[in-house]
Image (spheres, grey):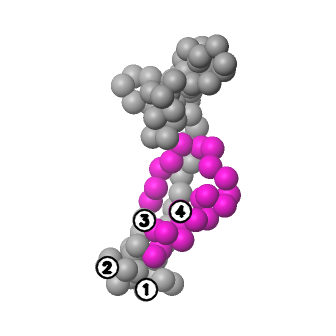
Amino acid sequence: MPLIEVSIARGRSPEQLRSLISALHRAAEETVGAVPENTTVIIREIEHEHWSRGDQTIAERNAAAATNATPTGQATADDAADQRSQ
């Protein structure tokens, strides 16, 4: 009777979250033989202001990235990598 809890930064579409839920259910079935109707998945979306790494919130990192964007308005490769890690 697995209970899978995931915390993720807010900002994914309902379709992305639904896909994540399905993938987690499949992983539980395939790896530990969990019965689908006995598997519970809980997704907690965390506001960017409430999630920090290295004493900087996601909101602060995003604001800094926007300030440091190249003249064309595009973020640097490091900023893009940070965005993917959210």
- Badge 3: few (under 14), some or many (20 or more) residues near its Cα, within 10 Å? some
Q: Is residue 81 visible?
A: yes
Please report whichever mark, 1 or 3, sits nearer to the chain's N-terminal start: 3
| Residue under numbered circle 3 | 4
Quarter of the picture holding the N terminus? bottom left
Please report whichever mark, 2 or 4, sits nearer to the chain's N-terminal start: 4
Q: Which mark is residue 20?
A: 4
Please report whichever mark, 2 or 3, sits nearer to the chain's N-terminal start: 3
Please report whichever mark, 4 or 1, sits nearer to the chain's N-terminal start: 4
- Marks 2 & 3, CB-CB < 8 Å contact: no
Q: Which mark is residue 35?
A: 1
Q: Give the CA distance from mark 2 to mark 4.
A: 18 Å
User: What residue is at 39 percent from the left and 30 percent from the top?
Assistant: 53
Q: Which mark is residue 32?
A: 2
Name the amino acid, label 1.
Answer: Val
Instruction: State left or right for residue 34 relative to residue 79.
Output: left
Name the amino acid, label 3.
Answer: Ile
43 over 39 or under it: above or below: above
Q: Secondary structure at mark 3?
A: strand
| Circle 2 or circle 3, nearest the eye | 2
Q: Picture coordinates of residue 73 (x, y %)?
A: 66, 20
- Marks 4 & 1, CB-CB < 8 Å contact: no
Range covered by the magenta-colored residues: 5-26
Q: Give the CA distance from mark 1 to mark 2.
A: 9 Å
Q: Secondary structure at mark 1?
A: loop
Q: Give the CA distance from mark 1 to mark 3.
A: 13 Å
28 over 84 or under it: above or below: below
Name the amino acid, label 2.
Answer: Val
User: What residue is at 59 percent from the left and 16 percent from the top?
Assistant: 70
